Amino acid sequence: MRFLLRRLGFYFVAAWVALTLNFFLPRLMPGDPATALFARFRGRLGPEALQALRETFGLTHAPLWRQYLTYVGHALRGDFGVSVAYFPTPVAQVIGTGLLWTILLAGSAVIVSFIIGTLLGVAAAWWRRGWIDAWLPPALVFLGALPYFWLAMVALYVLGFTLDWFPLGHAYSDDLTPSFSPAFLADVAAHAVLPVGSIVIATLGGWLLSMRNTMITILGSDYVNLARAKGLRPARVVLRYAARNALLPSVTSFGMALGFVLGGSLLTEVVFSYPGQGYLLVQAVRNQDYPLMQGIFLVITLAVLGANWLVDVVCLWLDPRIRDSAS
Amino acid sequence: MSAPGNGRSMGVALWWEAIHRDRKAGMGAAVLAVFAFIAIFGPLLVGDPQALVGIPLQPPSLHHLLGTTGQGQDVLAQLVVGTRVSLLIGFGVGLAVVLIGALVGVTAGFYGGRIDGLLSLLFNVFLVIPGLPLAIVIAAYLPTGSFTLALVLVITGWAWNARVLRAQTLSLRQRDFVAAVIVTGESDIRIITSEILPTMTSLLVAQVIGSTIYAIGAQVGLEFLGLGDVSAVTWGTNLYWAQNDSALLTGAWWTFAPTGVCVALVGFGLSMLNSGFDEITNPRLQLERAWREHLGRHGVKPARSTPVVRDHA
């Protein structure tokens, strides 16, 4: 329990750093931040509304610490101001429309990639110098070196455009209304295959290599040799004895990989015009919609921090040693 | 007491050994050599990449080996000229990121205590904040350009190196040869620069390679989003214009495919070099290779076991 609380404290510090970065970034811009930030509102907002918006961001003439407190106060209440591009919708509401799609895309990509990559890593370590071990790691390293979004472009071009097997973009067909009907869910799944698939292929190599390398060390250890000498079935030795312990480093790096994949999936969303955070973020950058941009950055950061904490919980459950050292 | 005095020369020699003894490392080095050649001499061999040389979106032909872009520029010329800038930023950022990482990581690991606590907190926070969104937000606020891009990549990329180098410094700090130097009363700076850093040379080089892979990928990604200097010719901006000119939906694969292959080849070459080097320096893998060769000479197929490392000294 103390371990989890300590980690929670750390994530709070990280969230505070992100919030503070968000506060100071506009002030690093050359010139008056407020003018630049709200330049695009001109003509659409009255002076009073503009003043209210300035106060949301703490961009007043008050001393800096005062501005900072105002900003943090508003952020804590989930008030990130009003979006420029989707005026007059509040930023929080715009972000809400894309959050679920990003979680669906990045979440399922990370989980699928982790499971397949780890299993392949186990297989590669068990059949050392077999064909899996000989061909898969270099091939996947090569695929992993491709930028995610480029892989997505190729997949879109070959499987979507040329062969016409999958839809060319968006999260679901325009002629369907979102619901939990089987037809709609199947449509969502068909739209997710290419984006999720391209992320999975690009990230598979990392999981495979990390699992394979740890497995090789563990398969050489005494307790695994003992298990083998006892005549246990190979499947049991590999999965229950070796793989369970070899899994730990992979699980530990899962949290960090999540942030990385989320970043990559932002680019993938752009290629597929998938209506998640990445697509919104890039639209915000192109429209100089600074309030929306900052809001999205904060929400993504908070999501990653939350997921990391969940990974800590899983680690604690998997590895009794952490529990012992913490108490 | 072991005193690895010639640590620096050892590091470079090991790399050299890796390149001509390990097939993977040799392959990686060859790929990189080709790209280095293109980056240095390529721009002299092709024409002006910005010149409008023909009808837009022509497929590859003898006249334009990789076709033309949506603006009517030669794709091959853009690819070759882009290589120089992209590799320069990639290696530059890779170096800078490891320098900063070493500064922070070695300081934290060497001094320990409160300094370590504070610096560790700092790089752990930077590790957990998602890098690409942060990079996008910072780049959007700063004036666009190659320098901004490099700066953003350094800010979001140094933390991992700091973490790895801190761990390494912590373990070196415990060794006898460092303890001996501390007893002789050498200054901290001297201990760090002439005892600790030289011992880590091979790790530092591996870190530079890994960071360069990161830097090239992140750079191409940011430029693809239009956050670089879109008037410059680099790999990332090539992809940006390909996407902007809807290359995908007009079937113009030649405007984006070659660039991606080049990015992947460089990344692949760098990782091969790194993993080949690992095979040479990792005693476990080294022993296994010797064992395999030994068995092979007697016509025996090696079993699944991993040989245990023993000190025969």
Image (cartoon, rainbow, N blue to C red):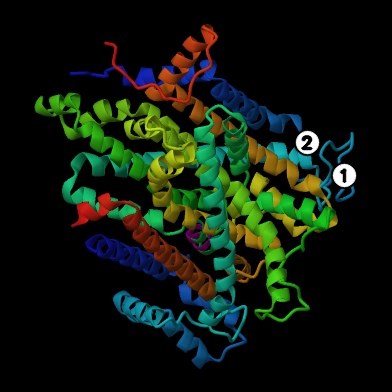
Task: Give how far across and how far down residue B83 sits, in percent.
Answer: 65, 37
Residue B216: x percent and y percent? 56, 43
- Which image quadrant: the N terminus of chain B? top left
State which region is magenta: B134-138
| Count of labels in the image | 2
B135 drawn magenta:
yes
Relative side of A202 to A306, left or right? right
- Magenta region includes residue A206: no
- Residue located 21% across and 52% down the image: A325
Where residue A264 sits, quadrant-wise, is bottom right
Q: Amino acid at mark 1?
A: Pro
Looking at the image, tell me whether mark 2 or mark 1 is earlier in sequence order. 2
At mark 1, the secondary structure is loop
Q: Are marks 2 and 1 on the same chain?
A: yes
**Dominant secondary structure of the magenta stretch?**
helix
Q: Amino acid at mark 2?
A: Gly
Chain of residue at mark 2: B
- Residue A192 image point, x, y percent: 67, 63
* Nearer to us in this view, A326 or B195: A326
Residue drawn at x 82%, y 50% is B252
Graded by Cα atoms within 10 Å as few (under 14), some (14 to 19) or many (20 or more), the crowding at tag 1 reads: some
Q: Is residue B130 above or below residue B68?
A: below
Image quarter for residue B245? bottom right
Q: SS for tag 2? A: loop
Rendered location of residue A148, percent (x, y):
62, 51
Callout 1: chain: B
Quadrant that contains the C terminus of chain B: top left
List the residue tagged with mark 2: B47
